[in-house]
Image (tube, rainbow, N blue to C red):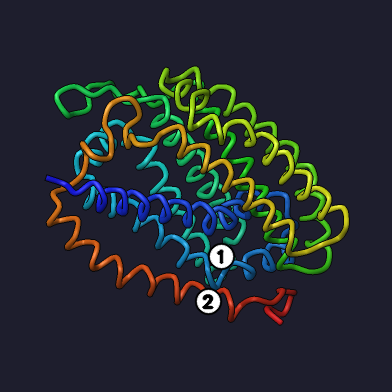
Amino acid sequence: MSDPIVTIIWAAIIAIGIAAYVVMDGFDLGIGILFPHLNVGPERDMAMNSIAPVWDGNETWLVLGGGGLLAAFPLAYAVILPALYAPLIAMLLGLIFRGVAFEFRWRDPGHRRFWDFGFFAGSLIATLAQGITLGALLQGIEVQDRAYAGGWWDWLTPFSLLCGAGLVVGYRLLGACWLVMKTTGTLHVKARRFAKWLTPFTLFMIGAVSLATPYVEEQYFTRWFEWPGLAVTIPMPLLVLGAAYMLWRDLESGYDYRPFVWALGLFLLSMIGLGISMWPDVVPGSISIYEAAAPRESQIFMLVGAVILVPVILGYTAWAYWVFRGKVDETGYH
């Protein structure tokens, strides 16, 4: 039997891991998606240099989220993976090809145009696949006898595609705000312009996904429009509008660091809304975290490792960001 308290702790660890991945890998995926809009030469080199010290470590959180799901909620892992094989494989292939392109564009300058395209395509495919995966999970997975009972293409729906497109727009905003914060010169000016027009576009996509979500699963109406969920549902649109306004204002006012913080705020508010929609399910409408949980002894054994390793990950991540906290120009960090 699982322990409800330990189960909730593990759900929080996985949620934090996924949130950390979205926050920290989102901006460098966004830079990859913006890559075709950057001039060949110093602009692209500067954008790559701004993420070079941290991009690989950011994906540690994806491993934590996926590995934690397998270890702490094996039933959920066994149901979700067969349902979402196609988008998850596409995401992993995109991340792999993107990583290869990142390294080879420096070591094979004769084919840099090809590797630049690979960096863009890998980033776009990975982001789109992540959004589609989220949308397919939100709309529900057909489960019978504790196993996936749907078809190969069940994940491909208008709603999942909407979520994929929304995440592409959101990551582009994060990437643009990161470049505003970390770069100088013409790239800095261009990134600020990108962030300005991406802000209302991101707001529109958040609204579109939010309006569509209650119609894909009946339980979302209950969780959004009945107490205690109503206490969060009522102020949430105002908070999102407020964060978007502050983001726009700080971009107009010439701030460098604050726009990135407000962009992260938009993602944080969206993830809170996602949590309200799904809790306490791990497979919406089918399997709760308590039904999917591993035995108590297994959870506690793994929790000991998590208590040791998560602070280590946080420590070296914070140290890397601190060491490379300055802006980057054509010569590197300064």
* Mark 2 crowdedness (10 Å alpha carbons): few <14, some 14-19, many ≥20: some
The answer, for residue 7, to whether it is visible in the render is yes
Is residue 90 depicted above or below 219 in this figure? Answer: below
Q: Is residue 317 left or right of residue 12?
A: right
Tell me residue 300's x, y (percent): 19, 60
Q: Position of residue 138 (x, y in %)?
A: 42, 30
Q: Which residue is mark 1?
A: 105
- N-terminal of the pair, mark 2 or mark 1, is 1
Could you tell me the amino acid type at mark 1?
Arg
Q: Give how far across and how far down residue 73 sits, in percent.
A: 23, 45
Vertical relation: 309 (above or below) 74: below
Residue at horizontal 63 percent and vertical 50 percent from the top: 265
Q: Which mark is residue 277?
A: none
Which type of secondary structure does the marked residue at label 1 adopt?
Answer: helix
Q: Is the residue marked by circle 1 packed among few (<14), some (14-19), or many (20+) residues within 10 Å? A: many
Residue 175's x, y, as percent? 65, 54
Q: Which residue is mark 2?
A: 320
Q: Quadrant of residue 304?
A: bottom left
In the rendered structure, the answer to whether residue 111 lies left or right of residue 1 reads right
Q: What residue occupies the far right of the structure in this picture?
A: 253
Residue 96 showing in the rendered view: no
